[in-house]
Each structure stands twice: as C-alpha cells, then as structure tokens.
Image: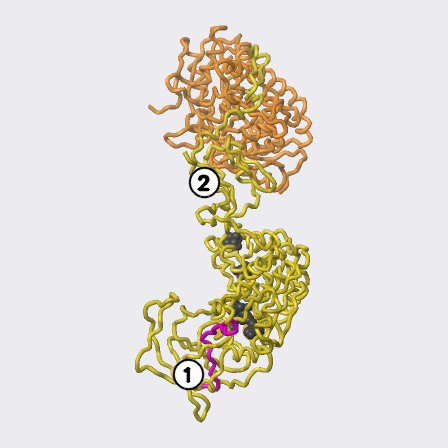
Chain colours: A orange, B yellow
Amino acid sequence: MIVTTEETREVITGNHAVSHGARLARAQVISAYPITPQTQVVELLSSFCEDGSLDAKFIQVESEHSAMAALVGASSVGARCFTATSAHGLALMHEMLHWAAGARLPIVMANINRAMGAPWSVWTDQNDSLSQRDTGWMQIYCESNQEVLDTVIQAYKTAERVALPAMLVLDAFVLSHTAEPVEIPSQEAVDDFLPPYEPDLRLSTEDPHSFSGLATPDTYMEFRYGIQKSMERALEEFQRVDDEFYEAFGRRYGLIEQYRTDGAELLLVTSSTITSTARVVIDELRDSGRHVGLLKIRLFRPFPGELLRSLVANAKKLAVIDRNIGFGVGGIFAQEIRAALYNHIQIPVFGFVAGLGGRDVRPSLIREVIEYAETHEEPEDLIWKGVKL
Amino acid sequence: MSKKVSFSGFSDMPPVTVSQGSMSFNATGNWRYLRPVYSEKLAPCRNLCPAGTDVPKVLALIAEEKFEEAYHLIWKTNPLPAICGRVCYHPCESSCTRSGIDAGVSVQALERFVSEMCLDLQPDLPSVKNSGKTVAVVGSGPAGLSCAAFLARDGVNVTVFEAEERPGGMLRIGIPSYRLPRNILDRELEKIARLGVAFECSCKVGKDLTFASLRRNYDAVFVATGAHSSRIPPPLRDSRDLVMTGLDFLKATNLSTPPEIGKLVVVVGGGNTAMDAARTAVRLGAQPVVVYRRSREEMPAGDEEVREAEEEGVDFIFLASPTAVQRNSRGLEIEFQEMVLGPPDGSGRRRPIPVSGSSFTRQADTVILAIGEDADLSLLSTYEADPGVFVGGDAQTGSSTVPDAVAAGRQAALAILRYVGVPASESATLSKPANHFSLDALNPDYFAVFPRVEPRHLDVETRLSGFPEIIQTISSLEAVQEAQRCIPCGVCNQCDNCWLYCPEGAISRVNGAYSIDLNYCKGCGICVQECPRGVISLVQEES
Ligand SMILES: Cc1cc2nc3c(=O)[nH]c(=O)nc-3n(C[C@H](O)[C@H](O)[C@H](O)COP(=O)(O)OP(=O)(O)OC[C@H]3O[C@@H](n4cnc5c(N)ncnc54)[C@H](O)[C@@H]3O)c2cc1C
Ligand code: SF4
Ligand code: SF4
C-alpha cells in the first residue's frame, strides 16, 4: 500500500498519527527498538519505508541506546532523524539524550508515556518523560491524535531552527491505541511548510572535522549557556511555528491553551489527555455559574513561565493535576508552576497527584479537585487523589 | 599538531566543539602490543589442488562473469582444464571451507564450465622468442602434455613421441568416454599442438627409435611413459592366457573394437581401472561382478564412481581374493578365498587376511584383472645419472592421478627450462601465500546458508544406451551463482570491512588492497574480527 500524498481524513490511532507525521516530515533516517505501547509507530514507518511511501533509511538496532546513538550519527551528517520509544526504552536512551542535545542535533522523537517499573506497568503516566527534563530536549505534551500528527511537523520546524532535539509525548493507550478522525495533510502542503533540513555544521568527508570533542573548563560552560539561550529562543520560535502552522493548515494549539478562563477565579491546570476530561467538567461548572477555567500546558520544555504568569495574573488560585510524582516533593508540573510564579506573583498553588500507572482520571475526580481547591484557603503541596488508603 | 584556537567568549564560539587541524600528533600506535598483519592466506582448495589452480581467484572471476580471464588464470598452471574439470578427484571440493557452513563449492563443475565456455579460445600466453632449444617428451599422457605445453610456452621446440596411434595416454587408452568424451580430449590436444608442439605417434621409443638417439638429438628428454604394466595376482600367473587385464580390455574398447566378453564377467580389483572395466562391460551387455579383497571403505576408487557403478547394475563381492582360474565346459571357473580385515598396513588401510578353508567359486565368461599397474622404466636403465633426462607422472610415482601428472609435467618443464638455460616466463613461477587459511579466522556471521549447485547426471537408462557423457555442464547462471558461494578463504575481495570498522581510521585503501598505518593502529583487533575471511591476522608485538 502506497499511501496517498493528497490531503485525507482518516480514523487512526495516536501511534499511526505519529507515523504519518514522520512520513509527511520526510524523515530520512529512522532507528528504533520496539516497546509496548510504541510498537505500531515504527511498524507503520517500516512498512512506509518498504513500500516506498517514505524514502528513509530504516536502521534496526538492538536497543534504544543504540537507536539514539545511530540517530546522533545520522543527524550529524545532516539527515532528518526520527525515533519513537516509551518508558524503559526512554530510560535506556538517557545518556544519548544528553548527547543529542549537547551536540545540537534536531532529532525528533515520540515518547508514549508509560509508567516506569518496578512494578511492571504498560499504562500511562508521565514519569518516564519528566525524568528526562534536564537533558536539553524540548518536550511537548499532546492531547489528541490530530495534535500528535501536527506536533511532529511543528517539532521538526522548531527543532531545526534552534538546533535542539524535540520530544513529543502522548499517553499510552488513551491516545496511542485509540482511533480518532485525523486530518492528514497533503505532502505538498507539508513540504511548503517544512523546508529540508540544512545544518550550519555537518559531518562530511569533504571537510572532515570531529565534533563534540573534549571541552576544557575554559569553554564547557559557554556551550551550556548556548543551549539555554537556544531554549529561550525556542519559546518564541515555537509560538511562531504554531502561528505559521495555523496559516498553512488552520489549526493551532499554543504553548499553553486557555479554556474558558474569562473571569475565572480558580484555574485548573492539566496536560495531555486529562485535559479532554477536564474540558467536560469545566463546561458543566461554568454553565452552572462557577468561576473556574482551564489551562492546558502543552510545552513543558522550554517552560513558558512568562506566558503562564500573564495567564494567571487575575486568578485567585491554581489547582494542578499531575499524572506523575517527583518522589520526595510532589507533582512535577506543580513544582514547575510554583517555581515560575514565586519571584513574581503570589497565588496559592494546590498540587494534586492522580492517575498514576494508567488509573482513570474521571470527571468525578476532577470535580473533587476543583471542590477541594475552592473550599480550602491554605494551599497544599501534595494532595493524593484516588489513592486507596 | 592541532591548531590552538582561542575564543573571547560565547559570542564567537561554534555551537559545539569542532576540531580544527587534526589529532595526528596523538600516535595511538604506541599503545599497541598486538599487531594486525594484512596478508593473504593459502585457501585449502588451492593448497590441495595438485595442479596448483588458484581456485579462489578463478571463482571470483567467474562470479564477475569474467569467464575468459578465469580460463587464462587456470591455464597458467593447468593446460588440461576441460579434462580435470571432468576426471579429477577434486580435493579442492572435499577440503572446501563452505562444507562447514552448508556444502563445499562445486569447484570442479565451475572449472569444467569455464573450459567449455572457452573451448575455442587459445590460452593467453606471454610472447617469447624461440629459444632454439629442443626437448623430446616420451609419452603423451597428461604429464607429457603438460610438460610440452609449458616448454612450448617459453619458446622451446618440443616433440612428443607416443607409442600409440594417437596422443592422450590414459586419457585416451584408459578413461572411458562416458566420463571423458573424446572430442573434448581432441580439443585440448589441438590447443597444445597450436603452441608449436610436434607429435610423433606410433613411435615406441626403445623399439622404433633408440633412447640413445633421442638423447643425442635433443637438449633434454622428459620420460612420461606412465604405468602400464598390469599386475597379475601371483596364484594366477600361470593362467595368464585365460584372463584379460583391465587395461587391455579398456584399451581395446577405447581404441578399436570391443573384445567378446560374454555375459558373466568377473572383475578383480577395487580401483579406477576395476570400476571403468566393470562399467564398460555393462555397456557392452554383460553382467559384471566386481570382487575386491577388502571392504567398500578401503576401495581406492572414488565414492561417486562406486555409487554410479552400483546404479548401473554392477554387483560387488567384498573380502575375497582369487586363488585359481580354470576352463570348464561352460567357460571359466574362478576360485576365491574369503578374507577378513587385520590391522592397517603401510597404505593405512586394513590388511586383508585369508580365512583358511573358506573358498568359493564363480562361473565366468570373462575374467578381468584390474588390481593395479606398475611403471616400466627399463628404457632408462643406463641414463640414471644423466642430468638431461627427466622423469615424471605415473612413470615416476606409479599409478596416480591426472592432476598429479599435470603438476609433474609442469614441474619438469620448469626444471628443464633451468637445465637448458631458458628463462621461465613470469607466470610459470607463480608463488602461493606462505600461511595457510585457518578455519578459526572465518567469521561465519557474514555467510548465509545457500544451496550448492549440483551438475545434472543422465538417468541410468540413457547412460546405458551407449557411452554418452554422464555428467552435464552447468549453465552460466548456475556457474555465477555457485562461484558467488566461495568465501574466498584468506583472499581479500575488498569488502571494506576493515577500513570501515577501524576505530582509529588507521586503515586506508591502496591499489585494490589495504594498508595499516602502525603509527595509529592501537592493536585492538577489530579489523581482524570483522575481516570475514581471515586476511588480517594478529601477531604479538615484540617488546
Ligand atoms: C582406467 C583408468 C581410469 C583412470 N581414471 C582416472 C580419473 O578418473 N582421474 C584421475 O585423476 N586419474 C585417473 N586415472 C589415472 C590417470 O589416468 C593417470 O594417473 C595419468 O594418466 C598418468 O599420466 P602420465 O602422463 O604419467 O601417463 P599416461 O597417461 O599413462 O601416459 C603415458 C603415455 O606414454 C606412452 N608410452 C609408454 N611407453 C612409451 C614408449 N616407450 N614410447 C612412447 N610412448 C610410450 C603410453 O602409450 C601413454 O600414452 C585412471 C587410470 C586408469 C588406468
Ligand atoms: S584440477 Fe582438480 S583439484 Fe584442481 S581445481 Fe580442478 S577439480 Fe579442483
Ligand atoms: S570457499 Fe572458496 S576459497 Fe574457500 S575452500 Fe571453498 S572454493 Fe576454496
């Protein structure tokens, strides 16, 4: 089956949305190791490579560490590179994640959020990707299959502009294995939007150099400074790319999305698919006259702190739902938000942890969260929701 | 040494460290205590081919469809490839490394294929001046022919004297045409004649011409008269007129009219001659039984030939030896004694020991004795100390094989050239790699299992309709496919693995080979591991 290059609308899973995104972005080198729940991503990509729908070199490897190592090499010569993984696979890649970012290689990867063992789990939570917070990768958390496909394309454009790798993240099963209608853009439209990758520096036999060799204390810090500067620039670039995407395809997602926040005194903050459930609850409460609104954090790295501050300036309280746990502290999004606010504005931030290991976060739980924040004055750092005691 | 670059700060730095200049100052070679050595090894097939064929190179040429080049390369050491491609016992195949992976390469079928493709092609030889030297070759078997061909190549005037009407030795007298069609033999002979070799047939030296006159008229003489005097078991010596020798039977059948042999034929012996005599008898309408004094395992005849004889209806009696033969009213009666196998004898095979009181008889129309042939060198009795007289082939070794005779002829030619003072052309002194390929050096991960091409055989019924050739030549498609199965052992085919894998980049490509820069080779041995075919080996560095 050679897929059409025309624009179509199809009912596809989140995993296949990732594959189509990588195909439309014309990834040139794909290297991956299968892991539940990511397998279908590379399965479809490998058949694209075989049937000629995608002209890419597919490198089979024996581990995720090797997958990323192979892409570090391929990206160094200027190839557009793609991989996908999940949980333990991402953890095994850890060393190479640092390397890809430090070497300033705009590799794009999809990580299907899956809880870390022990004990074994295959269901969703965010601890795998959030553990990679400080590797220098951009991280974008997606809510729908459409957003997944679109984010692959956006991620390449941003990553290549700022010379940093990007990871888009989607929930195991809730998105990865659930089919939704998705607009699949035409190849022509994506080609117009996303130019071929042209790195400033590339590994080449024509002009041989070695890259990323030893940096002494005399220079190392400046390279780190460069990454931070690029991360800061990525905030603007990501916004610009989202705007350009809107112009080209009529869809946009923002860095942080506001949902019914007008005049809201309490702002609920979510990420990924919990957001979709939260939208239903917010609609319900708003319609019954309650002053609540919703913020969906899409871009986690770089963290859009300034934007966040402007969006919460008029609110009285924040309630953050984290599907992750920073052991010894609390939810990681909540920590990030408090850190972003602390020097600037004083707003109580309630930190809720829920839905770990794929446990459902139902509308009733979200209602309880809102209820709790509304009725308590003193903010609490860590409130467990749905845990059986 | 690398260039020293200074930066004022972030604003004038590249995004990552980028080498300027090179690391060539860092001579990692001084870490080394093991040294990789790039040198070709002697492949087992090449080592064991008596004729010295450079099998791996020939196969590589076939794999690239360079059939003529392959032919010329074979001819450098073997002027009878179409014949060896048929009758050689092919030790190249039995020793082939691939037999440890799937099955040995069909080298003989490939040699035959190439020589068939090039049946009309004269070998590509260096042009040399006529040296004015003359050499007489006595005997036109493979040894004589090979010697004549290599002498003629280097500008020596050769005359071959042959007792029979037509040249070829055992190839014409002994080996039946179902294994070696005579048009093939004639084509090979024509090529040698075209090199300027003269043939004097029907001239038996010692009878039609004295050896002394030959020695007088030529600068050197090569004696390759073969081994033609058939052995007779001692108990049957007195009944000589009642029996026929295998060689006489084959010679009569091959050269003129087949003798009357009747239906019941007893063939005594277990070698080539016995097999060919029995199988020829089948084709003449007889029902032969082969009687051999040891068991099947000890038979000197090739396995394939014994199997084919069985397929064709030849019967076998093992562990029996003839003790008498006499005429009776129905024909001949031959008496045998049963044997058991004792401890191994000088030939390494178990010695047959008679079982007393265990005789049996067999009725026969014809008894054929094929227990071996000896050389007769009476011709030479007074020339032993003459340095201008050379001997080779079966005449020197006793019954041996065609490729051995070819090799003996070539060696004799080299010795004679030296003796008469004519320089041997370069290719006549081909040298072989000193070190043998070792199986441990093979990296089997690089070789997938692939079935061997087997040449087709005629079915038994067609075979027995006369003397058609049994084995068929493989197609060029099959030949290329089969040649590609060759490893080749210890021979570099520029796969680039070493060049690619060397972590120090110490290996470079030079004129179709590789060179290792020891200033940077740290002796890790990765190239040795990744060379699929053992061309690179590690040696201990002297401290
Ligand atoms: C029946 C049979 C089957 C065989 N099958 C095989 C086989 O399948 N494979 C294999 O490798 N080997 C085989 N052999 C062995 C092989 O044929 C010999 O080893 C080989 O031919 C020896 O070569 P040669 O040149 O030394 O002697 P020969 O081939 O024996 O040639 C010697 C020649 O010298 C001639 N001659 C002898 N005396 C004189 C003289 N005084 N003056 C002039 N000419 C003389 C003879 O007529 C003969 O033509 C077989 C042998 C026999 C008998
Ligand atoms: S002459 Fe015999 S051993 Fe040599 S390559 Fe040919 S078949 Fe093999
Ligand atoms: S694989 Fe090739 S080189 Fe090796 S023994 Fe067999 S024929 Fe010879």
The residue shown at (69%, 31%) is A188
Q: Is the Cβ of the residue at disc 2 closer than 8 Å to that at disc 1?
A: no
Same chain under badges 2 and 1? The reply is: yes
Which residue type carries mark 1? Leu
Indicate the position of residue B367 as horizontal and vertical percent values: 46, 83
Q: Position of residue A173 (x, y in %)?
A: 48, 32
- Chain letter for the residue marked with disc 2 in the picture: B
In the rendered view, tell whether residue B465 sits above or below residue A222: below
Q: Give coordinates of residue A7: x percent, y percent.
A: 67, 33
Q: Which of labels 2 and 1 is toward the front?
A: 1
| Mark 1, other Cα within 10 Å: few <14 / some 14–19 / many ≥20 | some
Whole-number angstrom distance, CA of label 2 to CA of label 1: 62 Å
What kind of residue is marked 2? Leu
| Parent chain of label 1 | B
Q: Earlier in the sequence, mark 2 or mark 1?
A: 1
Decide if residue A257 is on the left or right side of residue B69: left
Residue that sits furthest to the bottom in the current view: B329
Name the residue that disc number 1 marks: B236
Q: Which residue is mark 2?
A: B538
Residue A289 is at least partly visible in this image: no
